[in-house]
Amino acid sequence: MLTEKGISKVHTLSGLAKEKFKDSKAKLIIIGASGWLGMSTLELLKQAVDNLDHSVFCFGSKVKNLTLFDGTKITQSPLSELSSFPKKGADYLLNFAFLTKEKAEILSKDKFREINSTISKTVSKEASRIGVKNICTISSGGVYVKDQILVDDFESSPYGFLKLQEEKMFSELAEQGAKVVIPRVFNISGPYTNKDNLYMLPSLISQALNSRSIEILSKKKIYRSYVGISDLLSTIFGCMILMESGNSVIYDTCGISKVEIGELAEIIRDLLNKDAKILRPEVDKESEQDIYIGSRAKIKSLISELKINESSLEDQILCTAQYLKAILK
């Protein structure tokens, strides 16, 4: 079992966010608490606040008992109950709830739009009613067609288009005096990673931990840049601390380094399983490269201003592997 002591070494708030929550009596609402980002946030907050049960209120699609690394349990209430939350009862609201791209391939486009639009409208409306002054909603690199060009129609990219609509909806809360932070998330690493069959980093790490080989199927070059979840959350909270009321900020996530999948596999092998063989078909140099990386400029500036100790790619791999080892036992 992954222990509280073990995870706290690699998964902690950093910079101004860490200083802010020390001895803090802040109340927080987390929407979509049972997902990857929600659970990682709970883990961080358990280290940062005095009493998780009295400081953090979780909501999601249904009632669910959530269990953290050390056995701490917290109950997630259905989103429908957010309407009963008292006014002025929370200082922060973090919204991680949204159907993913994979759901867009399963549901009809109309149903996908209906569900996500309802979530966005419900959360923004209740954040306004409650009077939350520090708000974050997670956006995505999926809002871009390519090269920082934004999606401009629903049919070509339902997920990206609806994320842009949500960005606009939450940005308007700043006009009511809230501080609004909207990270466009590209590639992240860390504990509670899920869907390791779909995401490159956990997939390669899982192979290194469980077999004698790391297999790459793609014949084209693939480039990514990773940000640790703890760095992402430290940036979110840090922005809320420094920003003046009535302002919003939107920024891409992007890590220290850009890495091609072949190089990433080599780093993972060297860190986790030196005997593993890397299997990959010959790269087709004529095929279009797969590059899914955000702009580094704004997040680099924020990380510096917020005094965040940014995680190296190697540290992110080890942190993610620590979690995957625990759940694979």
Image: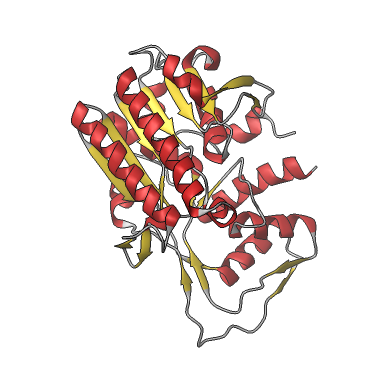
Location of residue 268 in the rendering, given as x and y in whole percent from the top left corner? 64, 60
Quick one: quadrant of the N terminus? top right
- Is 92 displayed left or right of 67 in the figure? left
- Is 300 displayed left or right of 187 in the figure? left
| Quarter of the rendering containing residue 265 | bottom right
What residue is drawn where x is 39% and y is 38%?
137
Quick one: quadrant of the C terminus? top right
294 relative to 261, above or below: above
Location of residue 209 in the rendering, given as x and y in whole percent from the top left corner? 75, 55
7 relative to 87, above or below: below
Q: Could you tell me how many numbered marks the image carries?
A: 0
242 relative to 182, above or below: above
Does residue 55 appear in the picture of this structure?
yes
Location of residue 243 in the rendering, given as x and y in whole percent from the top left corner? 23, 33
| Quarter of the rendering containing residue 199 | bottom right
Location of residue 260 in the rendering, given as x and y in whole percent from the top left corner? 52, 70
| Scheme by which the image is coloured | secondary structure
Does residue 255 appear in the picture of this structure?
no
52 relative to 276, above or below: above
Nearer to me, 35 or 326: 35
Nearer to me, 104 or 227: 104
- Is 307 displayed left or right of 36 in the figure? left
What residue is drawn where x is 57% and y is 68%?
261
What residue is drawn where x is 21% and y is 35%?
247
